[in-house]
Amino acid sequence: DGLAAKTARSLSDTHLLLLPADEFKRLFEEQPVYRRFFARGRHAEPRRSDMAVQKVADLMSSPPITCSPQDTIRHAARLMRDRRISSLGVVDDGRFVGILTTRDLSTRVLAEGIDPDTTPVCAVMTCDPIGLPAEALGSDVLNLMFEKHIGHLPVVDGDTLVGMVTQTNLTRFQAVSSTQIIQDIAEAETARD
C-alpha cells in the first residue's frame, strides 16, 4: 500500500535515498528477507515465528559470496572483511567444492603460521562440507549445526551453492520474531487476541 509501518525523525542533516516503487515491489516479491522486513506489523503473509518450520530459503543469505580455490588466503580474508561476512563458499568452475570460515583462518592459518600471500584457499578450506537444499526446514539447520558443531551451513542445489545460513541469520530471524510477538501482545485488546 506504500505506507510505512514505522516512522522516523532525523535529529541531524540526513541524506534520504529513494528506491523507485517498481524496484521496491520487485524486491518485495522476489526476496523473502526483504518482504519479511517490510511486512512487519502488516500481516501481509502468514506469520510463522517458529524457526523450526521455516524453509531454509527464507533463512539463508543469498546470493552467496564466493572465491576460487586458487585465490590466496589474503585475497579471501580481505573479501570477508570488505563484505563483513564470516564465511566464503569456495567455487571451482561453477561447482561448490568447499567453505572457508573465520575459524579456518584462525586455526589453520594464523595458529600454524601459514603465509596468506602465497597459500591458496584450497590448502586450508573445509572440503565438501555438508549442505542442505533450500526446501529443507529450519529444524534441519538447527540439528546439523548442533550435531556437527558448525556455525555456517551451505545451501545447495546439486553441486551449486545457492546460499549460506549462518548463526547470524538465525539470530536475526529470532530477533524479528521476538519483536513481532511483543508488538502483537501490545496491540491485543483481549487475552484471547
Image: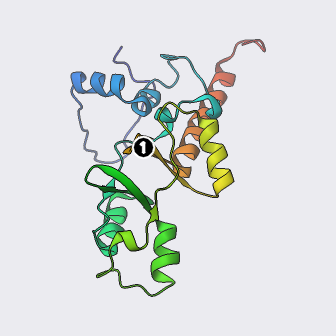
| 69 vs 165, nearest the viewer | 69
Residue 36 seen anywhere in this rendered image of the structure = yes
Residue 85 seen anywhere in this rendered image of the structure = no
**Residue reaching furthest bottom?**
113
Q: Is residue 138 above or below residue 189?
A: below
| 9 vs 6, nearest the viewer | 6
Q: Quadrant of residue 67?
A: bottom left
- The residue at the point 77 percent across, 11 percent down is 192
Apparent side of residue 161 relative to residue 175 in the rendered image (left or right): left
Residue 27 percent location from the top left of the image:
31, 28
Q: Is residue 136 above or below residue 42?
A: below
SS for dot 1: loop
Mark 1 residue crowding within 10 angstroms, few (<14) / some (14–19) / many (20+): some
- The residue at the point 49 percent across, 70 percent down is 104
- The residue at the point 42 percent across, 29 percent down is 32
Indicate the quadrant containing the C terminus: top left, top right, bottom left or bottom right: top right
Colour scheme in the image?
rainbow
Residue 57 percent location from the top left of the image:
46, 33
Residue 28 percent location from the top left of the image:
35, 25
Q: Is residue 70 above or below residue 147?
A: below
Apparent side of residue 179 relative to residue 35 in the rendered image (left or right): right
Q: Is residue 69 above or below residue 162?
A: below
Indicate the quadrant containing the N terminus: top left, top right, bottom left or bottom right: top left
| 5 vs 141, nearest the viewer | 141
- Residue position for label 1: 61
Q: Amino acid at mark 1?
A: Ser
Residue 47 percent location from the top left of the image:
58, 21
**Residue reaching furthest right?**
191
